Amino acid sequence: MLADLVQNSLDGLAAGAAYALLALGFTLIFGVLRRANLSYGPAIMFGCYAAALTHQHFGAGLFMLALVTIAGAVLAGAYVERLCFAPHREGSAIAAMVASFALWMQFEELAALVLPGHLYAFPMLHEGAPLALGAFTFRIDALVLLAVAILVCASLWWMLYRSRFGLAVRAVIEQPTAASLAGINVPRVLVRVFALASAIGGVAGYLVVASNGQITPMLGMWATLKGLLAMMLGGLGSLPGAVLGGLALGLIEAHSQWYLGPQMRDLIAYLLLFVLLAARVPWMTSRSAS
Amino acid sequence: MSLLAVEDVVTAYGKIEALKGVSLEVAEGTITCLLGPNGAGKTTLMMTIAGILKPRRGRVLLGGTDIAGQAPHAIVARGIALVPENRLVFPAMTVLENLQAGAFQRRDKAAVAEDVERMFTRFPRLKERHAQQAGTLSGGEQQMLAVARALMSRPRLLLMDEPSLGLAPLVVEEIFRIIAELHRDGTTIFLVEQNAHMALKVAQHFFLIEQGKVTFSGDPGALAEDEVIRRAYLGSAQQ
Ligand SMILES: Nc1ncnc2c1ncn2[C@@H]1O[C@H](COP(=O)(O)OP(=O)(O)O)[C@@H](O)[C@H]1O
Ligand SMILES: [Mg+2]
């Protein structure tokens, strides 16, 4: 009983680490732009497909594939930023969101064009047996995922709170007009944050695809949904909240899958979000209200 | 020559022109004051000079160079800093970080650190609270912080948009004492105020703006104070 609980929690944390990364990228974009980027996941998928193609044609190594994924996600992110967000900086948030949905469809069509089959193999991070420690097993790829997520969080924290660029990012998140008046080039900060968020998404996308050993055109929607859900669970717009929201989502999914069955897995997460929103818990209403 | 010259500036929100051809000048080394009733276009003018709003027409000359329509960060680089209406401090950042943000374009770390110390000397309350989040400060302290943050860019011209708004009378007096001090130290100040009585005491020159147009300009003695105050609060339309 207890062993199951611990094992499920470990599995949940690993999945949650990926969700946390997705939510971090989502939250960064939401924080500086006050706009939801529905094409966030599809841009990550673009990067993963670029890596899958690179693998097919050149058989590149794991590290190279990770770089290709990140570069592809940043490139696709830049495309989304130029088309959806740069033109609507002062204008309607809805227009930007709808535009990002249109690009989502573009990315899915593109995926269907370049890899018409539904499922493609992707080189695994680790093929051997999982690490056994007493009664528990650790998947090596899950450990890598956790370690990378911790590294990304620590670097992001350092960047935000210890660097000049981070000061500018926080200023833009808190009070964009005052940031401009302080001499910060706000449009430039926005573009860079978008690129950074896409890169973090690329890292998450690569780790997930390489853990699963396969890629499907569902990846885009999956990444957007999980990122959005984790961001909202953690309280729209808070970076530590995004990490906690991601981990919580991973744990909730793992436990509800084990105790209630796989069909209930996603339902429970949505139900929880609904309850939290309806109950107006403080951390979900304070920032999103402004 | 005047440090700042605004020439026939028109700024609009959509179809509504908030500034309908404003011209005025701020001489180097003076405190110049802009008075006018609510909705006259004072904030719109400040935002236009600072580059947050783009004028539809007209010129904004700083030391003879037209800066109209430039990006706000480029205008800061040219030496203008605005203390915005409602202060707009960065609430979750510490007092010290707010000051550092004000010096964002400066790369001279040692001189920036010196200026932070100078601000702490001028505003001792900020020193006491340097590690506190700016959002936890009182209204008066936030106003001091907004002024100090603007000064951190070492501006040639300091714009202030209603610095006394919503503050207790004692705090308002302190703000005006600081304005006079800054002026004595050589800063050129262009001040928007609702508190005409206080503003006329410190200013060397003032302009009246009503419904997007400058309707009067002169020295503080040029118009009976009660007449200025009446028009500054109510506008001449209500005579
Ligand atoms: N963001 C805005 N959108 C539309 N109209 C605005 C906006 N801001 C100000 N206005 C209008 O422009 C006019 C001038 O406003 P403002 O410059 O704020 O006046 P003041 O600072 O003198 O009180 C007012 O009629 C106001 O309603
Ligand atoms: Mg105003």
Image (tube, rainbow, N blue to C red):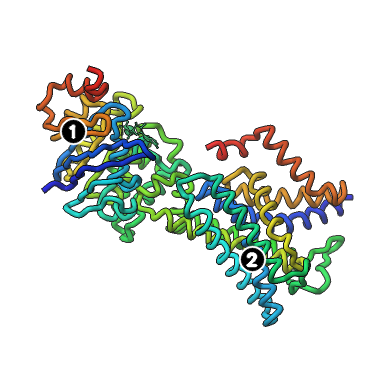
Name the residue at 75% across, 64% down.
Answer: A216
Above or below for B46 versus B197: below
Name the residue at 22% across, 48% down.
Answer: B59
Identify which amino acid the numbered label 1 is placed on.
Phe
Identify which amino acid the numbered label 2 is placed on.
Phe
Q: Is residue A148 visible?
A: no
Above or below for A145 versus A160: below
Tell me which corner region of the image, top left, top right, bottom left or bottom right, holds residue B129.
top left
Counting labels gives 2
**Chain ID of residue with mark 1:** B
For the C terminus of chain B, the image quarter is: top left
For the residue pair A285 and B234, the one nearer the viewer reads as B234
Tell me which corner region of the image, top left, top right, bottom left or bottom right, holds residue B90.
top left
Name the residue at 31% across, 53% down.
Answer: B70
Instruction: Work out which residue is located at the far front of the displayed protein and give it.
Output: B15
For the residue pair A253 and A220, the one nearer the viewer reads as A220
Q: Which residue is mark 1?
A: B207
Q: Which residue is mark 2?
A: A46
